[in-house]
Image (spheres, rainbow, N blue to C red):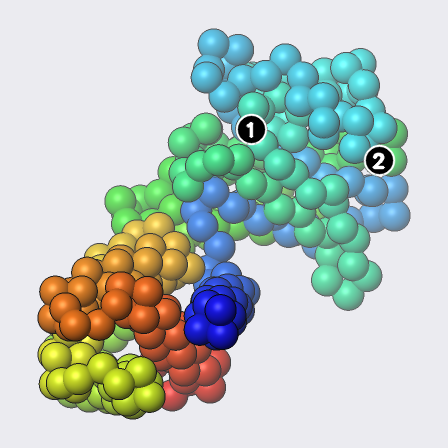
Amino acid sequence: MHKTKILFMFFVVALLSFIMPLSVVYANSPAPPSYFYAYVTNTNSNVKYMDILVKLSKESEYYSDLNSSNVNAYGFNSSTPIVAYNKDGYMSISFHCKDIKTMQSILQEDFGMYKDIQLDNSSNPISTITDSIRIALLDENGNIIKVSNVVSVMPTSNDTFPREVRYDASSATPIVNFTPYYHSHMVGNGILSVSFILAFLFRMAISTTIETLIAIPFKIRPLWKIIVTNIATQIMLFAFILSNTQGYANAVIVGEIFVFISEFVAYIFLFKHISKRKIAVYTAIANTTSLAIGLIFNSFHIFV
């Protein structure tokens, strides 16, 4: 019974130590391509809201007669001018697109107007919905004060996607900014550079040392098997994160799960004299500890 309680406490600690570092990963990771940000400056006092108009046909899979959740959030209805707007195929993304979450416009005196849009349940950018957009400036009742010129959201490079649009209300045409898909912030700096290789080797050495030291109180022997297994999984994790395009947080989460499973299976075969429960507890604690240390290094930009 005493051993069962100790084992249970180990699992709880391992779970908490796994969740907390991953929350840091999410907090510091770049937003996925499905997020699109809009900024408007130099508006007059009559402008209370802004919206993005997308070129959308009623036959499109993304079209909705009425996005009721957004309509209700603003207190508008189907006859409100911005909701009813449909000119040259352009209509409101907030009120006529399926699976779209939009934040109400936030007006900051020293910053301007801000709004973000998320394509729900998707990692696709706004360019999958429309090839161009316009910005609509609205009063508090949803009446349209001004509509900007058309601007394209189609990337000129296959490796980039539209991240944000910035619109100076005193001008006619917004500016769309594109950003590269996430591959790893180190890719662009040169994988074969001396500094990159040294940083990788240092991080791998730290991780391997931590997991080897944690194996000592668990009485897992011989330690060289821990070292070899850890080096192999670190190389695989490194290659996976570099090749991933879905964002740093997703890469780390999926990669760490893969590492945990791989090491757990490897240790079962390498240490047949040790119980699977003991190996599971060790693997969870060792990996979450090395992950937490790695995230601390990231936070302080140490060997990043």
Label 2 sits on what residue type? Answer: Asp
Label 1 sits on what residue type? Answer: Asp
Spot occupied by residue 33 in the image (x, y as percentages of width and height): 43, 47
Mark seen at residue 4: none
Mark seen at residue 139: 2
User: Residues under labels 2 and 1: Cα distance?
Assistant: 25 Å
Q: Nearer the viewer, residue 257 or 272?
A: 272
Q: From the viewer's perspective, tell me whether residue 231 is left or right of residue 35.
A: left
Q: Is residue 255 above or below residue 144?
A: below
From this viewpoint, which residue is outermost toward the top?
59
Mark 2 or 1, which is nearer the eye? 1
The quadrant in which the C terminus is found is bottom left
- Image point 59% across, 41% down: which residue? 117
Q: Nearer the viewer, residue 68 or 83?
A: 68
Q: Nearer the viewer, residue 12 or 31?
A: 12
Regarding residue 67, the answer to whether it shows in the image is yes
Query: Contact (CB < 8 A) between labels 2 and 1?
Result: no
Q: Is residue 144 above or below residue 218?
A: above
Spot occupied by residue 160 in the image (x, y as percentages of width and height): 34, 50
Answer few, some or many: residues within 10 Å of disc 1's Cα (few below 14, many 20 plus, some between 14 and 19).
some
- Image point 41% across, 41% down: which residue? 123
- Image point 17% across, 84% down: which residue? 221
- Image point 67% across, 22% down: which residue? 67
The residue at which mark 1 appears reads as: 99
